[in-house]
Amino acid sequence: MPLPDDIDDLDAEFPLGDGSADTDAVVYCPYCNESVEIAIDPGSGASQQYVEDCEVCCQPWTVNVLYRADGGADVSVTPLE
Ligand SMILES: [Zn+2]
């Protein structure tokens, strides 16, 4: 019995590559409190965490992205520890 390929499995469970998923989000910088629109990539998976710098004050954030089943994304940023 063949073992499933983990990476293909993830794609099958997250079929959001059809353009219906959010590709940007507005977040509020935890340092300067400005609203900043950031690009997010549904092709990188349903749950993502990465580091990005604020466009306004250049402080580093930890960005957390969680895609819902409808393609909407919950995005939050926290100060990089
Ligand atoms: Zn900022």
Image (tube, rainbow, N blue to C red):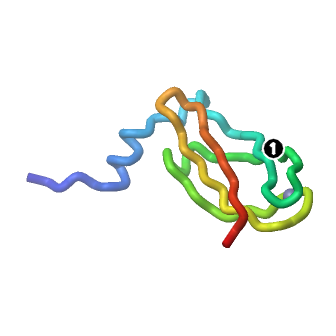
- In the visual, does 38 lie left or right of 33? left
Q: Residue 20, position in %: x, y?
A: 59, 28
Q: Quadrant of residue 7?
A: bottom left
**Residue at 59 percent of width and 32 percent of height:** 72
Residue positioned most to the bottom: 81
In the image, residue 14 above or below residue 29: above
Q: Residue at x 68, y 39 (%)?
A: 23
- Percent x, y for residue 44? 54, 51
Q: Amino acid at mark 1?
A: Glu
Left or right of 42 on screen, residue 8: left
**Nearer to me, 69 or 1:** 69
Please determine whether, in this image, residue 7 is positioned above or below residue 17: below
Ligand 1 - quadrant of the structure image: bottom right
Regarding mark 1 in the picture, which secondary structure is present there? Answer: strand
Tell which of 13 and 77 is nearer to you. Answer: 77
Q: Nearer the viewer, residue 78 or 45?
A: 78
Residue 67 in the image: state x and y as whole percent. 54, 39
Left or right position of 53 against 23 = right
- Give 78 or 13, whichever is nearer the viewer: 78
Q: Residue 2, percent across and down? A: 14, 54
The residue at which mark 1 appears reads as 37
